[in-house]
Image (cartoon, coloured by chain):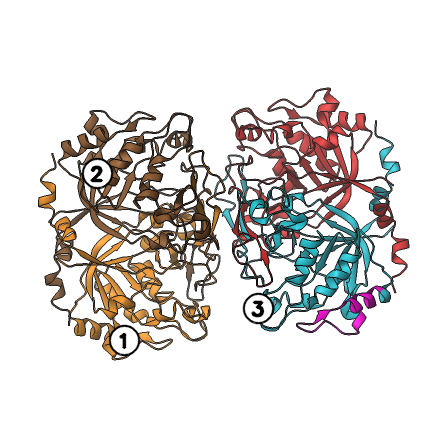
Chain colours: A brown, B orange, C cyan, D red
Amino acid sequence: MTTTARHADRLLHAVRAGVEIYDLGRLLSIGMPQSPNHPPFWLTMPRRHGDMVRADGGSAANDLLVMGTHVGTHVDALAHVSHDGLLHGGADAAAAQSGGRFTELGVHTVAPMVSRGVLLDVPAALGRPDCPAGYEITPADLDAAVDRQGTPVEPGDVVLIRSGWGRHFDDPDRTRYVGHDSGVPGVGADGARWLAARGVHAAGADTIAFECLRPGQGHSSLPAHRILLVEHGVYLIEAMALEELARDAVHEFTFVLAPLPLFGATGSPVRPLAVVGRG
Amino acid sequence: MTTTARHADRLLHAVRAGVEIYDLGRLLSIGMPQSPNHPPFWLTMPRRHGDMVRADGGSAANDLLVMGTHVGTHVDALAHVSHDGLLHGGADAAAAQSGGRFTELGVHTVAPMVSRGVLLDVPAALGRPDCPAGYEITPADLDAAVDRQGTPVEPGDVVLIRSGWGRHFDDPDRTRYVGHDSGVPGVGADGARWLAARGVHAAGADTIAFECLRPGQGHSSLPAHRILLVEHGVYLIEAMALEELARDAVHEFTFVLAPLPLFGATGSPVRPLAVVGRG
Amino acid sequence: MTTTARHADRLLHAVRAGVEIYDLGRLLSIGMPQSPNHPPFWLTMPRRHGDMVRADGGSAANDLLVMGTHVGTHVDALAHVSHDGLLHGGADAAAAQSGGRFTELGVHTVAPMVSRGVLLDVPAALGRPDCPAGYEITPADLDAAVDRQGTPVEPGDVVLIRSGWGRHFDDPDRTRYVGHDSGVPGVGADGARWLAARGVHAAGADTIAFECLRPGQGHSSLPAHRILLVEHGVYLIEAMALEELARDAVHEFTFVLAPLPLFGATGSPVRPLAVVGRG
Amino acid sequence: MTTTARHADRLLHAVRAGVEIYDLGRLLSIGMPQSPNHPPFWLTMPRRHGDMVRADGGSAANDLLVMGTHVGTHVDALAHVSHDGLLHGGADAAAAQSGGRFTELGVHTVAPMVSRGVLLDVPAALGRPDCPAGYEITPADLDAAVDRQGTPVEPGDVVLIRSGWGRHFDDPDRTRYVGHDSGVPGVGADGARWLAARGVHAAGADTIAFECLRPGQGHSSLPAHRILLVEHGVYLIEAMALEELARDAVHEFTFVLAPLPLFGATGSPVRPLAVVGRG
């Protein structure tokens, strides 16, 4: 029947030759930094080993998970943001959410991604260890990263923008990463347009929001969300772990993302991967 | 710097030549079939569009997710099952779960998988549309599927065993798929040893448990869990959607799985992928 | 200062003379019957004794509670039901719920109740052990109960209507009490008007909804909710345990109810009490 | 039948003559101060009006509640604390919690309380507006309050100890009330013994824990919990609202408490009442 498949499939051939996997998802643990706009992460074991032991000596433990869908590393579905009452494509947001779920633009409609990914290492292009708090990453910065790396952005790519802010994720001060008072570096309206103009499929960042957050302003204005999610239908991936890719200067890779198909939801926790063939 | 990477990476080259992605995860929706042993799935929107509109006309909606980690398509971590008080590798289960989480064998220790996957289509090998309720899939059945397909199982593979029972997942009678009274087809102790002997990395099924469940017996005895999880450290993936792979006779593929790194948990909801290169 | 208070307080004097407390709340446990319209009840211990022992040998265990607010014995706030888009008092329901909570008519606005309570034992008045499935309790039935008991209903009273259906709450078949197929006895539109005409403050029942549910109809029409909650501002208390009051022929008592002040919610789980002085 | 009941019941007679109810429970809202040891409070509406409108124009909204049981105003069951592995009465804590719930000493075993309550207004006795952060309330302070008020504590009473710290509950700085760095005033080991010696049934406080918390020490040592819960079986009620009672100099009253009968849980959110007869 399909005995010839393995020989014809160059993808599988490359996989079998060996791959290196970069884990771009943050460890999900109680107390990790998250926005107070979203339900807190909690995880607990209703059943532990020994609670109910079967006649043969077997025992199972299990968990209860409670969390917002925009907590930890996560993807924003197009339903997440509206502007002037409209979602991407012009759908009326109030009508679309009737029933308590987004049948049309919910995260279950986000197709799994297996595609080219590009890391734009902005601090490296700027000759700095990281972008300062509140710094707006400009189109010039993005161009500089592309040039330095030799990785042009192409239509359909997933582009991950490193600001260096991700190193604060594990700071003992849980408010540091969220950065309400300090501000957080990121792409502003101009950078968002730069990405949209290149036809990217999704864009990611190592910050809690794919935005430049000004000191003390919080999420009062989210132009990159409007431009990318609402105007151009570009998915956003936030709170990514990008330090290892940068350390190893891996700027181009196979990007893999499989959001949980939560029917009607506005987002999903995810564990994105960057995969590099070693064959 | 790394400008040569894209040329050297045959994996990415294959991806860019085009891939077909089979989605092996079930849609996660309120009321879907699940075991009563696990906390029910619930999903709701704390914030809808219009609840809080920013000065610039922007608005965000979000979600609260509540669920067991062994609900919908999911992976079992090694911590999930113990036998005679011991986990895989001989760790004491009571000590390992102290603190309410498994630091050592929790699902956060399950490395993302990008590897060869094999579908063993048992009903096709048996010349039937599906395996009957309570049917035990035997080593002979597994051999027959391998032979018919020409897809030998190799060490490190992820092997997905189709029983055909997955078609009941969307049955209006939510108890049908769970199959407590009817029984559910699956691999028993012998089939589990067959898999373990071949050194598979993980094994999946289209049923709610990777087991042959006898009519009316429920989960009273789970030999495949014991043999695979506890004795051999083989991860289990349950409630998979395997019908499309079978329909298209895709028996060998690149298998991708990225469990949520839930610190200390016994399992994670997942959306596994089977990827086939078209280049 | 207030040393004279205790002598002046006849309430406290009566309490100190001895009271008998009837517990009208159902035990809240996983798997108890509830409507599928509401998030299921779940309860688990994140921390158990021994997980974290203090230097002095002390240890604390705690819980995580997940539930709908109309699960188990509960009270409906006026915000719970609207008719033709309007809440009690004519407020626009869509506007009132903006922000995801009812600032005005939420359950936090339900004042604690310490008042006269009356049990109307309808089966006793009918000379039956209980009302049959789907039976509509009529004004004539309510009059008969009042007459038999000698307990006229007065303005401000809390009236609890026993149908006898409460004995199914603990049925091993969890669908029995919900009674979708069988129907459930209760007050219909006429009985609701009877209560409203008497100016009751709240009304309770031993069924999952304060309604007569026809076989197979479920909650497709809820006239008592409309008349009592929306038109007359009468709170409803559901899934009450009324068998002990009936057994002891306690038809008049001090009724006590203290809903959890859940800000903006449509209901609250409660444990109502009927207190009888023994002094 | 029971027509004479109303005449014989002096309790109901007193209630009908008029009562004043003091609400001792805190408003439960997202973001309120709570200990990070417990799962955060969250409340959201899965269904809003308009999501599903019945043919007759009716619509229902409902809620999902997620919270720890020691969050907001709450009662501690005897199962909450162990010492040297033992619960109150000498039960082995590890055995008692097997199965993930406390069948014996869980909060469902806490009988509803309708009894004499006494407020001990410590700041008033000290001639201060409130007790300073970290202040230990001593037996001498408690004696002074009793003497000043003329309200001796008697066996079976519920004693509420006001420190004045409750005014910080609504502080915009949510960490203020928790008081980790500042410390929190409360009863220490000596005060706990004072209460135990008087045979009180339960004891309450206006702080997040019924303890004197030293600056920066958090919950590292909880002697009052040990003495009252473990050694003497006295229930604790925490995070109470006691300012109104103090303002009105109400030091003696009918205390009412009906914990949710959460099967096997270590605590329950509650809305305690102080009721004063006006007849």
| Observer able to see residue A75 | yes
**Residue under pointer 3:** C175
Q: In the picture provided, is D133 more to the left or to the right than A109?
A: right
- From mark 1 to mark 2, how far is it between C-alphas? 45 Å
x and y, in percent, of residue A10 in the image: 12, 57
Amino acid of disc 3:
Thr
Q: Nearer the viewer, residue B50 or B208?
A: B50
* Residue D228 part of the magenta-drawn span: no
Q: Which mark is residue A119?
A: 2
Q: Which residues are magenta?
A: C125-146
Task: Classify the position of the N terminus of chain B by image quarter.
Answer: top left
x and y, in percent, of residue D277 in the image: 83, 41
For the residues tagged 1 and 2, is the chain the same? Answer: no
| Front label number (1 vs 2) | 2
Q: Nearer the viewer, residue C89 or A17?
A: C89
Q: Nearer the viewer, residue D229 or A150?
A: A150
Label 1 is found on which chain of the structure? B
Q: Residue furthest top?
A: D127
**Residue under pointer 1:** B123
User: Mark 1, residues whose alpha carbon is within 10 Å: few (<14), some, or many (≥20)?
Assistant: many
Q: In the picture provided, is C83 more to the left or to the right than C115?
A: left
Image point 48% across, 40% down: which residue? Answer: C52
Amino acid of disc 2:
Leu
| Front label number (3 vs 2) | 2
Task: Classify the position of the C terminus of chain B by image quarter.
Answer: bottom left
| Observer able to see residue A267 | no
Image: C178 above or below A195: below
Q: Secondary structure at mark 3?
A: helix
Q: Which mark is residue C7?
A: none
Image point 50% across, 37% down: which residue? Answer: D36
User: Mark 3, residues whose alpha carbon is within 10 Å: few (<14), some, or many (≥20)?
Assistant: some
- From mark 3 to mark 1, how far is it between C-alphas? 36 Å
